[in-house]
Each structure stands twice: as C-alpha cells, then as structure tokens.
Amino acid sequence: MPAAVAVLGGALVLGALVERTDGRLYVFCHTHPEIDRVTWTALALIAGALVASLVGALVLARTRPRTVLPGAACLAAVLLMLSGADATDAYGEELARAAAATGRPDGGSCEYVVPTYTATPGAFFPFT
C-alpha cells in the first residue's frame, strides 16, 4: 500500500504540473503584487501535495496499518491540496483578467517589458 500511495500521489502531482504547461496568457501594463502571491501559493500547494504523498507513503511503510483508511486519507490530502492549487489559480485568473482589462489609464501601449500571467486549466477544481 505505501508504494501505491506514493505512485498515485506522484501521478496526480505530475498531472497537475503537466496541465499547467498550457493556459491563457494575460498581459497587463501595471505590476500586480497579488498575482505573484497567487502563483507561488499554487506552486506551494502542489509541492505540499507531493510532500504529503511521499511522507504518507513513508509513514505507511513504517506503521503498516491493517486498513486502507490511512492510505486513502493521504490521497485525500493530496487531492485537497491539488484542488486548492487549482482554486488559487482560478482566483489568479480573475485577478489577471481584471488587471488586463484596465490597461493603461491613457489608453496607450506599454512602454516597457510587460508583466504577464498564464492562467492554467484546473482538472482538480471543477469551477474554472
């Protein structure tokens, strides 16, 4: 069972990372500090899911529980963190959409390297 938790958890995390390789690109002229926090929070949740999967597998290997409940709880924690990452990314897309819609106040184009945000689809959060 520990190997199954590690493999399934790792596969879910890999799927979450692969789905983030393609998304909608938002370009805006003004920096938006909250978007950076959203990006790092989503990545931290994905990293936390990987850690939960690996630590759960190690704990299961050491304790050898008689039921599948602890393994299911580990995988539930992984899914919860991944859905939280997708929900965070959906919030980031809302922020990016609002920031991109405002543009420059005078209606001109940006005169410097513009900040961007890539919104990725979320398979673990169904409300995107």
Image (cartoon, helix red, strand yellow):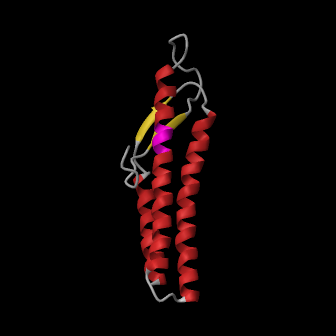
Instruction: Identify which residue is drawn at 49% across, 65% down.
Output: 78
Query: In this orientation, which residue lies closer to the viewer: 71 or 69?
Result: 69
Query: In this orientation, which residue lies closer to the viewer: 107 or 38?
Result: 38
Q: Quadrant of residue 58?
A: bottom right
In the displayed structure, 122 sits above or below 54; it is above
Q: Quadrant of residue 54?
A: bottom right
In the displayed structure, 4 sits above or below 28; it is below
Q: Position of residue 44 (x, y in %)?
A: 59, 55
Instruction: Identify which residue is drawn at 49% across, 30% down.
Output: 27
Q: Position of residue 83 (x, y in %)?
A: 45, 55
Q: Is residue 92 magenta?
A: yes
View extreme (right): residue = 33
For the N terminus, the quadrant is bottom left
Q: Is residue 118 magenta?
A: no
Q: Position of residue 62 (x, y in %)?
A: 58, 88
Instruction: Identify which residue is drawn at 37% across, 45% down.
Output: 127
Q: Which residues are magenta?
A: 89-93
Q: Quadrant of residue 111?
A: top right
**In the image, 44: left or right of 90?**
right
Query: In this orientation, which residue lies closer to the viewer: 124 or 13?
Result: 124
Query: In this orientation, which residue lies closer to the viewer: 71 or 116?
Result: 71
Instruction: Identify which residue is drawn at 60% across, 41% down.
Output: 36
Q: Position of residue 52 (x, y in %)?
A: 55, 69
Disc tally is 0
